[in-house]
């Protein structure tokens, strides 16, 4: 074997190894995709947040008034049916309010806007972190998490030579939105926030 033969067979070996690695990686990813969550996507964005009030009175009662503008987008070639959605607002890791959104149906690509509103008062537990609250009160910008929990049903159809077949599958669905919300009297403005969706 000449020198060039050795070099070219060495190169050939490296290239085949790389190909093999790429194929194995592809197969592994395929199985992760197959068994890890669904092949469907739903995008949830909090487009607006109006925090008219977020005050702690002398009795340690939180007075709040928060309205969100949330968009749900269904980019799949399928129809999504949402059960009643439980919306929970948390501050400092603790629930301070809940809201409900009635069930609705969403066809392909059509965005749906919902407006969960929280406007009541809630006594705070003695475990409430006053230090965190007082720090955020200075800037009038609060870190509030909002979660959405429901069940969804996805319906899609497939057409072949013999006709069209309808399929349907249900999922437990949740979204978590980590929001940074300025009060209405603050100079800051709310930034559109994309939520983490799991199902
Ligand atoms: C605090 O609670 C007391 C007793 O319930 C009540 O009289 C008072 O008005 C409350 N203060 C505020 C600011 O709500
Ligand atoms: C909450 O704030 C909105 C304005 O963002 C206002 O229209 C509404 O009346 C307020 N609700 C309460 C109970 O204060
Ligand atoms: C909000 O959610 C984020 C992301 O899951 C998490 O890291 C953070 O601790 C949560 N904050 C609160 C106040 O619950
Ligand atoms: C405060 O937290 C402790 C430990 O997490 C818990 O045992 C206690 O019941 C809490 N108290 C209140 C009033 O929530
Ligand atoms: C075509 O769809 C029918 C149901 O509508 C199904 O029974 C059949 O197996 C499908 N054929 C192929 C080749 O996928
Ligand atoms: C919005 O985004 C800008 C740019 O990233 C940032 O400087 C600002 O603090 C954000 N505002 C809030 C309320 O998070």
Image (spheres, helix red, strand yellow):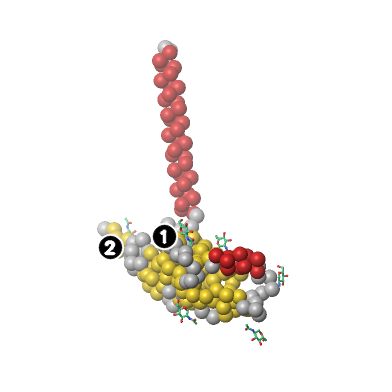
The picture places residue 56, in percent across and down from the top left corner, at 61, 75
Q: Residue at x 57, y 78 (%)?
A: 63
The answer to whether the residue bearing label 2 lies less than 8 angstroms from the nearest atom of ligand 5 is yes
Residue furthest left as drawn: 161
Q: Can residue 64 be seen in this snapshot?
A: yes
Disc 1 CB within 8 Å of nearest ligand 3 atom: no
Question: Which element is circle 2 on?
Answer: strand
**Mark 2 neighbour class, 10 Å CA radius: few under 14, some 14 to 19, many 20 or more:** few
Secondary-structure class at tag 1 = loop
Q: Which residue: 47% across, 66% down? A: 187
Q: Can you say whether 59 is above or below 183 in the image?
A: below
CB atoms of marks 2 and 1 within 8 Å: no
Q: Nearer the viewer, residue 142 or 41?
A: 142
**Residue drawn at (55%, 65%), measured in percent from left and top?**
139
User: Which label sits in the foreground, 2 or 1?
Assistant: 1
**Where is mark 2, residue-wise?**
163
Residue 88, percent across and down? 53, 72
138 or 57, which is in the foreground? 138
* Quarter of the view holding residue 108: bottom left
Residue ID at (41%, 66%): 47
Q: Quadrant of ligand 5?
A: bottom left
The location of residue 170, given as percent across then percent down, is 45, 67
Q: Quadrant of the N terminus?
A: top left
In the displayed structure image, the side of residue 72 where residue 177 appears, left or right: right
Q: Give the camera-side residue of 139 and 80.
A: 139
**Disc 1 designates what residue?**
41
For marks 2 and 1 on the same chain, the one whose residue lies earlier in the sequence: 1
Left-right relation of 142 to 126: left
- Cα gap from disc 2 to disc 1, whole angstroms: 26 Å
The reply to whether residue 83 is visible in this rendering is no
């Amino acid at each position: 074997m000449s020198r060039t033969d050795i070099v070219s067979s060495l190169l050939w070996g490296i290239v085949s190894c790389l190909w093999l690695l790429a194929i194995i990686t592809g197969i592994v990813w395929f199985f992760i995709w197959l068994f890890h969550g669904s092949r469907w996507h739903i995008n949830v964005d909090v487009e607006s947040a109006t925090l008219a009030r977020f005050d702690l009175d002398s009795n340690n009662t939180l007075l709040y008034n928060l309205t969100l503008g949330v968009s749900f987008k269904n980019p799949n070639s399928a129809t999504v049916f949402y059960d009643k959605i439980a919306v929970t607002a948390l501050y400092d890791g603790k629930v301070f309010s809940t809201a409900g959104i009635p069930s609705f149906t969403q066809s392909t690509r059509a965005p749906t806007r919902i407006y969960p509103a929280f406007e009541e008062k809630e006594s705070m537990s003695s475990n409430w972190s006053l230090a965190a609250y007082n720090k955020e009160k200075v800037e009038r910008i609060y870190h509030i998490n909002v979660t959405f929990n429901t069940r969804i049903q996805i319906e899609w159809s497939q057409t072949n030579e013999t006709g069209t077949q309808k399929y349907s599958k249900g999922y437990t669905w949740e979204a978590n939105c980590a929001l940074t919300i300025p009060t209405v009297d603050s100079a800051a403005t709310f930034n559109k926030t994309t939520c983490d969706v799991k199902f």
